[in-house]
Amino acid sequence: MKLYLDPISTTSRPLLMFAEEHALPVEIVHVRLFEGEHRTPDFLRINPNGCVPVLVDGGFVLTESGAILRYLADLAGSPAYPTDLRARARINAAMDWFATNFHTAVGTQLAYPALFPAFHPFSPEARAEVAATGLASAHRWLVVLDQHMLGPRRNYVAGEELTIADYVGGSMLALAEAAEVDLGDTPNVRRWLATLKGRPSWDPTFAAFNGLLSATRPAA
């Protein structure tokens, strides 16, 4: 079983964390996005979308990070994706929320244009306008995450136990941090993120991404 990804990819890191914590028999194949390896003919034969991550399990090919995470969780029999129908529905809803509402604001509108401007060749005026819209939305979603998805008594975004939704959300919140988004008055979000950062898999998973940020930011 092979998992094609790049550790700098926001959607790849939840899979890296999950695979690390569950000791899955999966071979990690590094597809270097900045070197254009996702656009090579060999990779496009695996995924015509030209995107990571991709899972290849024998003759079965699966794209899309959330679908792969669910597949691996079922394969591992992980309690992070329980079989109860309503528990799964809550987890699926949280994953969809992070992938749409939260990621649109934090990733598409804020982090990626700010961190990697060479890949977003917009005018400074257009970038500033998009960033302002993203920042307003990000603050709104952070309040929802803090007060409604977490709250003072819930340890994780879909209940009292860690689920695959936390792997997804943690990667996206780390992206907000990288873009220096002010988390504001969100004590529950900060507590949750600190819990995730305390997991042994966090630092190895985020090492490449943090190294990239250090290399691209000007020295103080």
Image: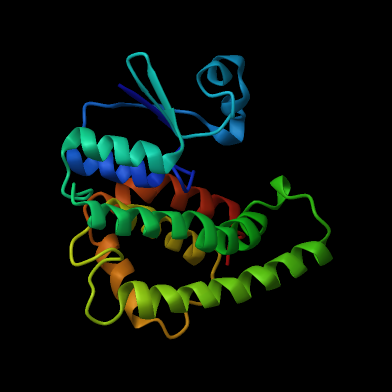
Q: Where is residue 195 in the image (x, y as percent from the top left)?
A: 25, 66
Q: Residue at x 18, y 40 (%)?
A: 22
In the image, 146: left or right of 111?
left
- Give the vertical position of 94 relative to 61 (above or below): below
Q: In which quarter of the image is residue 3?
A: top left
Taking the image as drawn, is residue 163 in sight?
no
Position of residue 204 in the picture relative to residue 101 (left or right): left
Give 157 or 171, whichever is nearer the viewer.
157
Which colour style is shown? rainbow
Instruction: Using the image as rendered, state which of residue 187 and residue 66 is in the foreground.
Output: 66
Quick one: quadrant of the N terminus? top left
**Residue 155 in the figure: left or right of residue 47:** left
Q: In which quarter of the image is the C terminus?
A: bottom right
Residue 189 drawn above or below residue 176: below
Q: Name the spot of residue 215 as percent of width and height, x first.
A: 55, 50
Question: Which residue is outermost to the bottom?
Answer: 185
Name the residue nearer the viewer: 192 or 6.
192
Regarding residue 100, the answer to whether it shows in the image is yes
* Residue visible at 78% across and 50% down in the picture: 121
Q: Which residue is drawn at 46% across and 48% down?
A: 209
| Residue pictured at 34% horizontal, 82% vertical | 187
Q: Where is residue 159 in the image (x, y as percent from the top left)?
A: 23, 66
